[in-house]
Amino acid sequence: MDFIFYASYYWNWLLSQFVGYPIVIKTTIVLVGVLLLVYCFSFFRFFRTHKVKSDYQRTRRKQESLLIDRLQSILYASKNYQQDEINQTFKDDKVLVKRNYQKRVFTDFIVALTEAGQANHDKINLNNYVTVLDSFGIIDFWNKIMGARSPKLRQEAIRALDDLNVGLSGASIQQSVYHKKGSLRKNARAAMMKYNINDPYKFLEEGFDTGFNAMDEIRLHYYLSEQAKQSALPQLISWVDASDIRYRAFLIREIGFFQQTGSCAALLELFKTEDNITVKCEIVKSLGIMKYTLAKEVFMESYEVSPKLVQRNIIKSLPNLGGMEVLDFLITIYNQTFDSDTKTQLAYAIGQYGEQGKSRLKAVVVTKSEFDKTLYAQVDYQLN
Amino acid sequence: MEAFFVFYQYVIYFYATALTLIYSTLALMAYFNIIRSKQSYSGKEERILKKHPESAPGISIVAPAFNEEVIIIDNVSTLLNLDYPNFEVVIVNDGSKDKTLDLLIEHFALTQVPYAYVSKVPCKPVKRIFRSTDPQFERLTVVDKINGGTKSDAMNAGVNVARHNYFINTDVDCLLAKDTLTKVILPVMDSDVEVIAVGATMRMSNGCKVDNGEITEVRPPKGIIPAFQEVEYMRSYLVAKMGWARINAVTNVSGGFGLFNKEIVIEAGGFDPLSHAEDLDMTLRIIAHKRDNNEQYRIVQVPDTLCWTEGPPNLKVLSRQRTRWGRGLLQIFFVHRKFLFNRKYGRMGWIMMPYIFIFEFLAPIFEFFGLLCLFYLLWTGQVNFNTFWLMLGYVYLLGTCVSLLTISYDLTVKKLYNNLSEYLKLILFASFEAFVYHPLTIVFTLRGYVQFLTGRNFKWGEMTRQGHSKNKPQNKLQVTK
């Protein structure tokens, strides 16, 4: 109350000093007042942010120094500890993981600890791991946050529970899969693949989401890889008829990555009818990765009439499909091409045929320019 | 005469008020942009990217080097130690006269390799290409070329040799954070519109502890000039660029650190070897290229500090740096004057270029003549001290408020310094910047304008390197693959 009284007193005093001055001066007084407020606010914000960050660092250091030895001995023990035993072990340390920010710090700490263990190929005792997390109330804490209204908090919870690799369920993610905030919605939809046991591929079937981008590709690839470790993936070819070109290209790439060779024939048929260059490029790459030899005839026949991007992918894929007719084809194309980038790709593709390929290339470049000769030397050196 | 002074005072007043409004808006936009960036990309996204190298886009780091024997080994080692699954390092030895190339050959076991060089963007002839015979340095390529006199020329040689679709334009004296590449590529991947360039926050390495080419402790610079420049850099990156990035209007992806889409740079003709501000020039040209072809684009700014550079340790080096920047800025308006107020170039023509012209190019001129006016009015006793202190406080508070906000934003992004006192040191420097450092930069920039207009024969401002590490260059390295 006193502060407001004094502030308004001095404010009025300041204004009285400039009575009769032009409007510009009066405006400046107001602006100076506003800037002073911003100045005070900035100082406050600075100290507050510093305190929050310092608290985090201090808590992390404290948790690490006091808990790391006991945690490691429990997490990597062969014996299964009971809840009571773990509670007893940490009974004096619960105060370190009591507040919300302390639970966040503990989550980061234990994730880092388990990742370090994985890097050292230490086998974690899952029973003890879950009991420790339960004992400190970590899973309950994050599950409570999953139900928060704030999309920021929900996203944080999905990430944390997935990092902890425990506690996330299809039901808890369900409420975020139609959220209006794109990044939360996409994260939740991708996570559904791992955590929804009823219909994990629901969103893959529905074209995933709008504005599909490379970040979504990474997320989906990550969850597909996790799923592939547990069980066989469904045939992704069944969703390749989606309307989003980028999404289709992604699915085709994944078919190649996960070696779904049963889809090769269908992909080759799609190559013949498809108009989109991006999709065609991905088909060529995937068939090359899967070494689908039946594709080489089609690729060689369509080379001349294909756009440059598709041509370059054909050059990269053909050596995987093997055969002397492919080497002859690559040599013929090398003789016909004038584009130095394509020539470089061709030279490396020919070089993949080993000594035979290199000797054929050497014979070709003898009559050609200095660039071709250097290119041969480059390929010969690098593939040796 | 009196009427002129009254008019000029009004010009200065409205100029300062416009700056207040612009910076307030930028500070607000920067805040939301920083928060959005922190929420969108956490350590989890970075870990996923590293765990799945097959999905990580390739990045070439291109760093020209000219007479850098003091720092070359440490800094190349830092680059090779970056934590990213798919990258290469291209060092362009731009005709160094010292032992730069010899040290590289010896330390990294380099050998000359046959290379079918294709000149996609113009530069002075490339003499040799070196690769390492030691598998732990397999990511390294060294290009030895004839000196072209500018960084642009050396960058073009690097772009010609770079294998990946994205490249980073940096200086060999810059130290990059270990997680630089993941941080800088995530926004590129997370965009529906093609991202043509990404910038990130840079700061001074002068106070940092460096061990085996890696920053082990971040501290504010000890010297006076680098400390002032630290505050200036933070304000420029965390408020101005982060703010402009919110509306896709970043005017300049810094030459010290910036990620570019290689195809776009090649299509735009590469870096201009005649430019004195090659970074600003390149940014404007790639934007113009996209606008000319009616294609959408985005330029992103990352709030994290990813690059540390050695700041000018004394006035002499600062003067050289700012004079060059001044020349470059003026040159931009000669070369790219067609962009200014040109509707065809959208926000570049109507927002970015006018902003640079009025608030960056004209600022030193207004401020210099403002000071002259002030001295004249003081001399002739025409100053009303009631309003003088008010106006001075107004302008001073504007600068200080923005600097203070910047430091608090920096803390929001990441707490890099250990102690509160180190941050308070920056605040102290921010408080004196307007009286000590800023007037000097005005004088140096104006000198650059004069040099450009009088057509003097410019020399590339060489930086006197002190080096970061106490380690001898011969030290062996641990390279993360």
Image (spheres, rainbow, N blue to C red):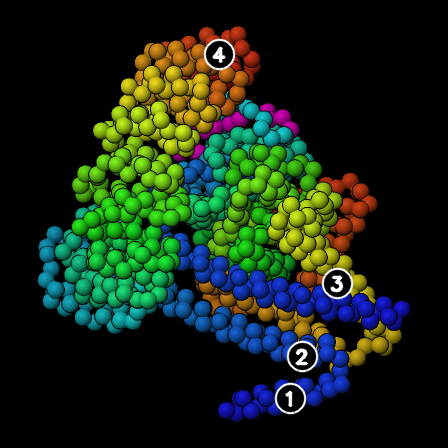
Mark pair 2, 3: CA separation = 22 Å
Mark whose residue sits in front, 4 or 3: 4
Q: Residues within 10 Å of mark 1 (few under 14, many from 20)?
A: few
Look at the image and tell me in which quarter the C terminus of chain A lies: top left
Q: Residue at horizontal 80%, vertical 46%?
A: B453
Q: Is residue B222 above or below residue A371?
A: below
Mark pair 4, 2: CA separation = 79 Å
Q: Where's residue A195, x and y in %?
A: 22, 52
Helix, strand or loop at label 3? It is: helix
Horizontal relation, residue A354 to residue B119: left or right:
left
Image disc number at residue A12? 1
Image disc number at residue A335? 4
The answer to whether the residues at label 4 and label 1 have Cβ atoms under 8 Å apart is no
Helix, strand or loop at label 1? It is: helix
- Chain hosting mark 1: A
Q: Where's residue B222, x and y in %?
A: 57, 60
| B375 and B418: which is toward the camera | B375
Residue B117 picture quarter: top right
Which residue is under mark 3? B367
Task: Give the magenta-colored segment's residue range.
Answer: B124-139
Say if the magenta span includes residue B127. Answer: yes
Q: Residues within 10 Å of mark 4 (few under 14, many from 20)?
A: some
Helix, strand or loop at label 2? It is: helix
Q: Residue at horizontal 16%, vertical 53%?
A: A126
Which residue is under mark 2? A29
